[in-house]
Every structure is written in C-alpha cells, then in structure tokens.
Image (spheres, rainbow, N blue to C red):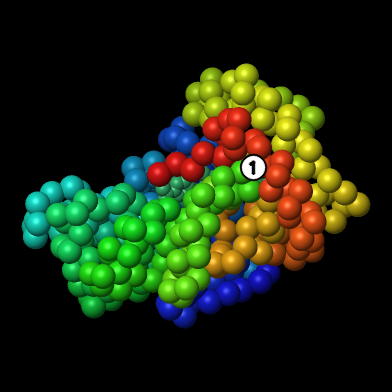
Amino acid sequence: MEYATLGKTGLRVSRVGIGCWQMANDGSWGSGATDEESIATIQHAETLGINLLDTSASYGNGHSEVVIGRALKDRRGRFIVATKVKPLPGAPGDEAARQEIVDILEGSLKRLQSDYVDILQLHRDPDEPTMAVVMDTLAELKRQGKVRWYGISANNTQLIRQLQALGELSVVQVGYNMINRGGESTLALANAENLGTLIRMPLASGALAGKYFKAQPNMTGDDPRKSRFESERGVAALKRLSDLRFLTEGGRRTMVQAALRFILDTDGVTSVIPGAKNRKQLEENAAAADVPPLSPEERSRAMLIAGEVGSISSLGLIQS
Ligand SMILES: NC(=O)c1ccc[n+]([C@@H]2O[C@H](COP(=O)([O-])OP(=O)(O)OC[C@H]3O[C@@H](n4cnc5c(N)ncnc54)[C@H](OP(=O)(O)O)[C@@H]3O)[C@@H](O)[C@H]2O)c1
C-alpha cells in the first residue's frame, strides 16, 4: 500500500480507501452489500494496509455509519473516518442551519460509536446566506474536538474559494474518473492550496471495472444504474470502453487497477475511495497502489478512448 499526507491535515492516509455508500444496504445508488460482508470487508482492510473510510450521515439514512461503527468497535484509532453532513439552506446567521449540522454530527457520532470524526465534509453546497454560519459551526465543532478536520464534497472551485475566505478548509472530495475529467480544475486548486483530496466515483460506478468488456450489463430491476448502463447509448459506450483492454495486456494490471492507477498518478490526488461490495473487490482495489503506472503513451490513448465515451453517454457522470 502507498500512503500520502492528506494536505494540511497532516494525516497519513492509504492512497486507496473504501467508499462506504455500498454499505448503505437500502437499494440506493451503488449499495448492495450485506452488513456481514461489509463488516468483514472493513476489517479485512486493515490487513491490506487500508486506513481510510468515506461515508455520510445520509447513506442508508445512517446505516453505512452503523456498519462502520460495528466494524471499528475495537480498532477505531487505527482508521481515518470521513463522513458528511448536508447543510440546510436558510437566512444569514440562521440558528437552524447551525443546529442542523450539530444534530446531524451527533447522530453520526452515535452511529459510529466514536466521540470524534476525523473529517467532516459538507455533502451539499451551502447557499450564500448560510455560508458564514456553516463555516463558523464547523470551526466550533473542531474546537470541541468532535471534528478533527473539515472540507466539502464539490467540483466547484469558485465555491471552494468562497468558503476558504470564511475559514479553514482542509479536504475536498472530488468526482473524477477516466471518463469524466471535469474535476481537474478542482484538483489543480487543491494542489496549489495544499488541500487533501478524496476521489469519488473513480470506477465510474463500475463502468470502468472491465466486467463489461465481454458481457453486456444485466442489472437487477431495482439497480439505480440500470437505465444508464443498459440504454442503447450506454451499451455502445461500454463497447467502446472495451478498447481500454490494452491497459491490461501481459497481466500487468486489471482494468480496475488501471482505472485507479490512472487517478493515483494525476496531480492533486491524495487518495481514491472506490466503493467495495466485498473483500474480493477490496483486494483488487487495494492492489492498484502496487501496479505499474500507465506510461505517457498509455495515458494519452486511454484518455482518448474514455473521453469519447464521456461525450456519447452519461456513463462517467459525476453525481453531486
Ligand atoms: N456526493 C458525494 O459526496 C458522493 C457521491 C458519490 C460517491 N461518493 C463516495 O464515493 C464512493 C465511490 O463512488 P461510487 O460508489 O459512486 O462509484 P465507484 O467507486 O466508481 O464504483 C463502485 C462500484 O464499482 C464496482 N466495483 C468496485 N470495485 C470493483 C472491483 N474490484 N471489481 C469489479 N467491480 C468493482 C461495484 O459495483 P458492482 O459490483 O455492482 O459492479 C461498486 O459498487 C462511494 O462509496 C461514496 O463513499 C460520494
């Protein structure tokens, strides 16, 4: 496993973490693991050198945090837990906006069975009138020791600068993958300002996993990805993605590892947080830190193919 310093937090994080939306167990986007397998997956992470978990108070209405709390019961201090809170819109200085963040965090702490979170990220852009109160509340929670560091999940440089003008911001969660590289301006800002970055949707929700090189997707009726992956354009796009197979030639790396390695070698990236549904997926993802980097020629060819896919389909779409 590779490790890196998460910007100005100074935290040493594994460069491959786990996106824990998959542990929501509620049928929402990307979920689908049983609690038993999720707990085993988190506990297995330690043996692979992974110490970074990303979740949210809203994944499964808190269920993902419950699962993490159970998994980390006797090992909390060995993991860096990043969770998220959705701020309410409101009026300037709005007490309700402050209270909402405090209440949501209290719920997260209970579910996580912890008296602190390492990183608290805003899971929705705060509206202009409440920005100051939101930033003040985060600073206060840090002073109280309930939050070690905070940041935002957003591909929006203007918003990040606005928030920085109102206080400290240490971590940005950026949506970025080989198909949709729109996050590069945010990564450049993060690089310049020494902000730690966590990369969400690195496998384009599974489209970049290589499993559709041979077989067309056949998702269950309630899989929220079904319409995106199985539409005519989605199927055509997945077919084009199979041209990325050259990245795996000679058994140097799997497609999953190529997609993650591509991101790990992008300027401004600290860690990727691919969602893992089980230990097998986790092992493959973790090993991305150890496979050979893509050569400049491989990178250019991959960007050409995946970029085309982004222009003909919604496969690389970054969810807000
Ligand atoms: N607004 C936000 O802040 C936001 C939004 C989205 C995501 N996130 C975070 O980012 C994390 C990752 O994003 P994501 O889950 O949307 O997308 P992702 O990581 O690009 O894709 C995850 C999906 O890829 C497949 N997969 C993962 N590892 C695999 C492997 N080794 N082999 C084959 N398939 C594999 C799994 O689906 P199948 O097995 O079903 O194919 C999994 O559900 C989330 O868990 C969450 O923590 C945050």
Q: Residue furthest right?
A: 250
Q: Amino acid at mark 1?
A: Gly
Q: Nearer the viewer, residue 315 or 15?
A: 315
Q: Where 241 sits versus 82, above or below?
A: above
Q: Is residue 57 left or right of residue 80?
A: left
Q: Is residue 234 visible?
A: yes
Q: Nearer the viewer, residue 147 or 74?
A: 147
Secondary structure beneath disc 1?
helix
User: Which quarter of the figure has residue 163?
Assistant: bottom left
Q: Nearer the viewer, residue 266 or 145?
A: 266
Q: Residue at x 50, y 71 (%)?
A: 191
Q: Where 132 sits versus 210, above or below?
A: below
Residue 171 picture location, percent across and down: 41, 67
- In this rendering, the count of numbered labels is 1
Crowd band around label 1 with a 10 angstrom C-alpha radius: few (<14), some (14–19), many (20+): some
Which residue position holds label 1?
A: 307
Q: Residue at x 64, y 69 (%)?
A: 49
Q: Where 206 sits versus 87, above or below?
A: above
Q: Nearer the viewer, residue 291 or 76?
A: 291
